[in-house]
Amino acid sequence: MMDATAEFGAFGETTVFLDYFKGLPDHRQVGKVIYPLNEILLLSLLAVLANAESFTDIARFGEKKLALLRRFLPFADGTAPHDRLGDIFATLDAGAFQRCFVDWVAALTRTPVEVIAIDGKTMRGTGGKKNAKEAIHMVSAFAARQRLVLAQVKVKVNEIVAIPALLDMMAIEGAVITIDAMGCQRDIAAKIIEKKADYILALKGNQGTLREDVEIFANEQKTRGFEDTTISTHQTVDADHGRVETRKYTAIHDVGWLQARHKWPGLKSVLMVESQREFADRIERETRFYITSLTLEAKLSGPMIREHWSVENSLHWTMDMTFRDDECRIRTEHAPANFTTIRHMAHNLYRKAPGKDSIRLRRKTAAWDDDFLVSLIAA
């Protein structure tokens, strides 16, 4: 195994991110390595920041931007062709790469992470044609308020198995973990409590009678003005695109009866969210329930539920519409997971860049302006 790092300060430009990938194993035979791994990572990240969407794009970027790349590292043998890039990413240990990513993003996040939204996404383009392999599914941990990807893992069986592995990768003490109904599992709740964090888990019908018991109790108490239990409430009203949405959050703090019946790890409160969406021609109503280890009032815990959906709007949507995730055709071995990690690195660097430009505009600017591109990774 060769060392993946090299001295690069003498080349003028320096970048912090490579420091976090020094321990990344490179299993190529030392005597046959033409393109050092740190050069491959630098090339790939800069190219993706500058709008590259495939190994062919990255290779062409390397050909055209060799002088820029040599501001950081020697690139004595130039840059790798697309097929060599594909081979390297296919065999690179995805787990080790992800652990390096987690260390890097932990340093990138300068403020405490308060809400971590965990959610899965299928990379549709990674699936083969009929009768071929299924598309890859990734589960990501997203810092809802900082809008940064904290970690991700490839799903091998289902999300229920993947989520504990994802939690084990991160230091989450003091954070609140939000997960949709798929993650409402005893083992996952216990893992979160074990790591000294809290949870808000969506309830559906996948936990026996738990949701049914919560719904019956909440509805009974609501009709009686919650006179038999202690609650707190919070309400928000949003108007956008001809729609007015009112959300009422009710935190039910007396749940000893529920804990005695279900013995759920860490359970302290139940949250009920009543939504009403008013359109010009109709009104839609929905009630959702959550269990939580928090004892906070509804005005504090309720908005965390709303923040969970930032993983859809600020991550999944961005990866689809800006990075064209669903059009990606990288499919070989570890390459899809590793390429996703590079894209998430780019996403985080765009988010951390100063100014109010959209990620779409920042990505275009990085392709047009070498100084802006360098500024993204030099900090």
Image (cartoon, rainbow, N blue to C red):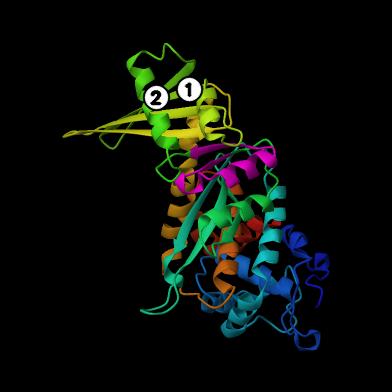
Quick check: 2 left or right of 65? right
Task: Give x and y (percent) for residue 10.
Answer: 83, 67
Q: Which mark is residue 218?
A: 2
* In the image, residue 190 lies in the stretch drawn in magenta: yes
Asked whether disc 2 touches disc 1, contact meaning CB atoms under 8 Å apart, the reply is yes
Label 1: which residue?
252
Quick check: 256 left or right of 7? left
Task: Give x and y (percent) for residue 12.
Answer: 78, 64
* In the image, residue 121 lies in the stretch drawn in magenta: no
- Secondary element under disc 2, as helix, strand or loop, is helix
Q: Quadrant of the N terminus?
A: bottom right
Q: Can residue 328 be spotted in the picture?
A: no
**Of callouts 2 and 1, which one flags the residue occurring earlier in the amino acid sequence?**
2
Q: Nearer the viewer, residue 143 or 242?
A: 143
Residue 36 lies in quadrant: bottom right
Residue 233 lies in quadrant: top left
- Secondary element under disc 1, as helix, strand or loop, is strand
Stretch of the chain drawn in magenta: 177-201
Q: Amino acid at mark 1?
A: Ile
